[in-house]
Amino acid sequence: MLKILDRIWRAFGNGLFLTLIGVGGSLLALTVFPLIALTIRDPERRSCRIQGVIHHSFRLYCRAIHWMRIADVVMEGRERLKDLGGVLIVANHPSLLDVVMIMSMVPKVQCVVKAGLWRNPFFRLTVEGAGYIRNDLAPEALMAACVGSLRAGKNLIVFPEGTRTVAGRPLKFQRGFANIATLAEADVQLIHISCAPPILHKGNPWWRVPPTRTRFHLRVGERLDIRPFMSYRFRSVAARKLVERLEHLYSDELAHGRSGVTIEAADHLGPEAGRSVA
Amino acid sequence: MTRDEILAALSSALQEMFEVPADKISLEAKLFEDLDLDSIDAVDLVVKLQNLTGKKFKPEQFKTVRTVGDVVDRVHDLVSQ
């Protein structure tokens, strides 16, 4: 009985917290962000302040998820992200909440966001004020915007898989992140995320929750120095080596069950998917 | 520069810069789909072609280029102008 109640509570919690992003975001967009926009004219300082508010809000959000026992949220090595500057942050992407959790770990960070958010006047104020980069820019302009913000000493989150991880499928990284890192000559900070048993993964509705409580585990991994990569004669080769290196590092983590979506998720997709994970 | 010379230079650039295996390079091979180049690679390649031919190219001149053969033709046209 308690188990059933717990499961219902967690399904409800998922819905509640997803709604909260929209509602909380709108509330901030109606109150705090216009105030910041009005009082701080300098766009640089303004975006810093807005990113700070987002960071603290997401921090509170992640803690609330943990305290309310919707899911366990464990973050490891957060202190190593405090003074980061001009670093490309990469992570695997098992769930919908990954970006929220990473932003709760890094005080100042930018990301590439859906252009759709620019259509909503309130969200526009937020995403534009925070200096986020919209994803509908032409490929060259998007690349230039990402490289520009890293060179200006800002941190940027990119998910090299390009989309949420699908369990049981071999890891395949896009080269975009490596192009950004090699063009900007920015170090790459790895974050490993595991979400087990999985919730909010690709193709799974929010209300479908596993029998036991999910544990989100975010571990701050290696920080790759970009300089050894830049010693290749061609940037294009450096980018390819960087993709290989990261695929290797993340596949290793995945194989040891330390990150990604677990085998339970793969079972869910059928025996074939399960085998390729094992 | 003859077409053959251009093809030879392009072929070694593709192998060196983009780790394309020699046996995948043919006139029909598509740069993005078959040889796994991306748009940033394309920019690097145009710069490389400039260095090889000593001519100045604009990226727009390579906008419609799809295959290795297209690149050879385009470079040949631009060089003989």
Image (cartoon, rainbow, N blue to C red):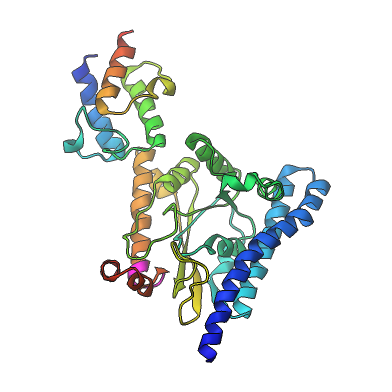
| Quadrant location of the C terminus of chain B in the rendered image | top left
Q: Nearer the viewer, residue A87 or A39?
A: A39
Residue extending farthest left: B23
Type of secondary structure dominating the magenta stretch: loop
Residue visible at 18% across and 36% down? B22
Going by the image, does A226 lie left or right of B10? Answer: right
Residue visible at 57% across and 65% down? A101
**Res A132 visible:** no
* Relative vertical location of residue B38 with respect to residue A78 in this rendering, above or below: above
| Image position, residue A104 (x, y; %) | 61, 64
| Image position, residue B34 (x, y; %) | 26, 38
| Image position, residue A41 (x, y; %) | 79, 43
* Relative vertical location of residue B46 with respect to residue B23 in this rendering, above or below: above
User: In the rendered structure, which segment of residues is drawn in magenta?
Assistant: A254-259
Residue visible at 19% across and 30% down? B26
Going by the image, does A231 lie left or right of A187? Answer: left
Determine if the magenta segment contains residue A230.
no
Q: Nearer the viewer, residue A228 or B73?
A: B73
Quarter of the image where one finds residue B29: top left
**Res A243 visible:** yes
